[in-house]
Image (tube, rainbow, N blue to C red):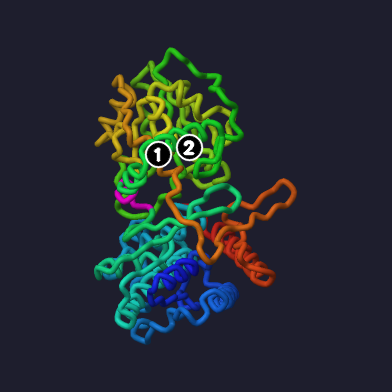
């Protein structure tokens, strides 16, 4: 965001750079509001802002827009709720503060169904108040600064979603900034989402066409390379999930004479609590959808059902993963564990019908002309290459009875091109790429990488903040069990 501020200044704009200053009740990086964390963050920001922005850019904190009236209104907001569904419906002046709060919690813990103890409700109360406070402060920012454009990062959390919602309601443009990796060792580029969360399905569909029509032949080549990279365990915009699998390996129970149905689930927590658009699904959870498909097996004696549990769930101890292995047993139902050596692509290639809950395997299977039944919402929903049943009866018919055609569509390559293409921008003034720490053969994951523009004391402070944030996350996981 410092880089964005300097770019805007160079382009002749008057820039006001607003930091929290410890004003908010909670944030994604400091969910329990540790004062030590706040102090390090404020110190780190102050040093960087002086170094990079100097006196060219006005720096203010949220305290500059706060007031006693805001404090009263925040205190008066009803933070009580008795279920996660009630929490999702929490709104303040038509801003979805409940979704924002739940989204931040799940991102920190991966717990989608927390036990609602007094402690848990206290954690959510902080998030809700932070979102309400940010909503009210946004009103004062508008009055005092009269901005023409707002720039924020990510936009999903309690500290940022209210900014998007409020300023859009006033007709003011909001550019949301995000980064995407260009490799697995700390190199990133910036992306801009204009007036939209990065998680908007409809917005992404527009972006697919924009990138495709820049150079169709190059886009087609890149799209095809995405599928080649995935199968060859090469970097293609995400982690490499198949590096521990054996090429061509099918389960010993595989029966080539049966109607082989393979279900690929996904990391459900990654897109939980985004908003109403992501709630449009046949089943409330993937677990319930899979359980229903399993329950149909007796009616279809020629069917064999395989569930390939997503490798990204390997270390997850919550029930949306562990309960998959507790579903009723049947000789023609086979659950392949997240850490199994069985090949994802061997399963996809040999299946008669593929069921996807949003994983990229759905796109990859459609690319090799396999019929894919999509259940739930994902970025490629509505692009025309998946069967999308409107109800459970239609779903059962497609999975177990119909001779389904493959639905190949050019949007398969458009989708793949968007993941692979150079759609972002590099830094101009502030190097936001990261340093990956190496200890023997161990390399720190993206979340633990250190800002390489920092030197000496800055690096130490950055490291302390990373460790302290991780400790808070682990504490939340320890204190807040699943229902």
Q: Disc 2 designates what residue?
A: 324
Q: Give percent across and percent down for residue 190.
A: 46, 57
Q: Disc 1 designates what residue?
A: 219
At 57% from the left and 25% from the top, the residue drawn is: 247
Q: Residues within 10 Å of mark 2 (few under 14, many from 20)?
A: some
At 51% from the left and 24% from the top, the residue drawn is: 346
Is residue 37 found left or right of 90 in the rendered image? right
Q: Is residue 289 above or below residue 37?
A: above
| Magenta stretch: includes residue 201 | yes
Between the residue at mark 2 and the residue at mark 1, the CA separation in whole angstroms equals 38 Å
Q: Nearer the viewer, residue 438 or 452?
A: 452
Q: Give percent across and percent down for residue 146.
A: 30, 78
Kindly report the secondary structure that dominates the magenta region of the rendered protein.
helix
Is residue 280 found left or right of 258 in the rendered image? left
Quick one: SS at disc 2? helix
Q: Quadrant of residue 410?
A: top left
At 52% from the left and 59% from the top, the residue drawn is: 480
Q: Quadrant of residue 380?
A: top left
Q: Give percent across and percent down for residue 182.
A: 53, 48
Magenta stretch, residue numbers? 199-205
Quick one: SS at disc 1? helix
Residue 172: mark: none
Asked whether residue 17 appears in the rendered view, the answer is yes
Q: Is residue 450 above or below residue 304?
A: below
Q: Nearer the viewer, mark 2 or mark 1?
A: 1
Asked whether residue 35 appears in the rendered view, the answer is no
């Amino acid at each position: 965001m410092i880089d964005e501020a300097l770019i805007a200044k160079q382009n002749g704009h008057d820039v006001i750079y607003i930091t929290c200053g410890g004003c908010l009740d909670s944030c994604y990086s400091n969910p329990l509001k540790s004062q030590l964390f706040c102090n390090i963050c404020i110190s780190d920001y102050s040093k960087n802002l002086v170094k990079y922005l100097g006196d060219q850019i006005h720096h203010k904190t949220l305290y500059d827009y706060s007031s006693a009236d805001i404090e009263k209104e925040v205190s008066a907001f009803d933070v009580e709720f008795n279920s996660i569904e009630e929490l999702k419906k929490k709104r303040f002046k038509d801003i979805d503060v409940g979704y924002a709060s739940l989204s931040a919690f799940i991102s920190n813990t991966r717990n989608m169904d927390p036990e609602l103890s007094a402690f848990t409700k206290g954690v959510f109360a902080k998030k809700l108040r932070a979102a309400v406070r940010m909503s009210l402060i946004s009103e004062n920012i508008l009055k005092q600064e009269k901005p023409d454009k707002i720039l924020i990062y990510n936009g999903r959390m309690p500290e940022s979603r209210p900014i998007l919602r409020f300023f859009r309601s006033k007709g003011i443009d909001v550019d949301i900034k995000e980064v995407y990796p260009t490799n697995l060792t700390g190199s990133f580029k910036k992306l801009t989402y204009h007036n939209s969360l990065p998680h908007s399905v409809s917005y992404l569909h527009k972006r697919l066409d924009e990138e495709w029509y820049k150079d169709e032949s190059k886009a087609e080549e890149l799209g095809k390379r995405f599928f080649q990279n995935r199968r060859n365990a090469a970097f293609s915009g995400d982690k490499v999930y198949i590096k521990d699998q054996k090429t061509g390996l099918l389960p010993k129970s595989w029966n080539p004479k049966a109607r082989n149905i393979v279900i690929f689930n996904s990391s459900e927590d990654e897109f939980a609590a985004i908003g109403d658009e992501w709630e449009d699904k046949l089943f409330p959870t993937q677990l319930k959808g899979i359980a229903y498909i399993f329950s149909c097996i007796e009616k279809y004696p020629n069917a064999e059902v395989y569930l390939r549990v997503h490798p990204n769930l390997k270390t997850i101890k919550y029930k949306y993963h562990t309960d998959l292995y507790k579903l009723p047993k049947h000789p023609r139902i086979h659950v392949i564990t997240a850490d199994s050596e069985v090949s994802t692509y061997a399963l996809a290639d040999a299946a008669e019908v593929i069921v996807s809950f949003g994983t990229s395997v759905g796109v990859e299977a459609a690319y090799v002309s396999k019929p894919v039944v999509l259940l739930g919402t994902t970025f490629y929903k509505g692009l025309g290459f998946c069967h999308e049943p409107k109800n459970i009866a239609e779903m059962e018919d497609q999975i177990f009875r119909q001779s389904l055609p493959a639905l190949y569509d050019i949007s398969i390559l458009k989708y793949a091109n968007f993941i692979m293409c150079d759609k972002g921008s590099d830094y101009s003034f502030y190097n936001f790429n990261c340093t990956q720490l190496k200890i023997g053969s161990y390399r720190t994951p993206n979340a633990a990488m250190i800002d390489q523009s920092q030197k000496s004391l800055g690096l130490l402070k950055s490291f302390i903040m990373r460790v302290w944030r991780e400790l808070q996350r682990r504490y939340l996981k320890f204190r807040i069990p699943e229902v």
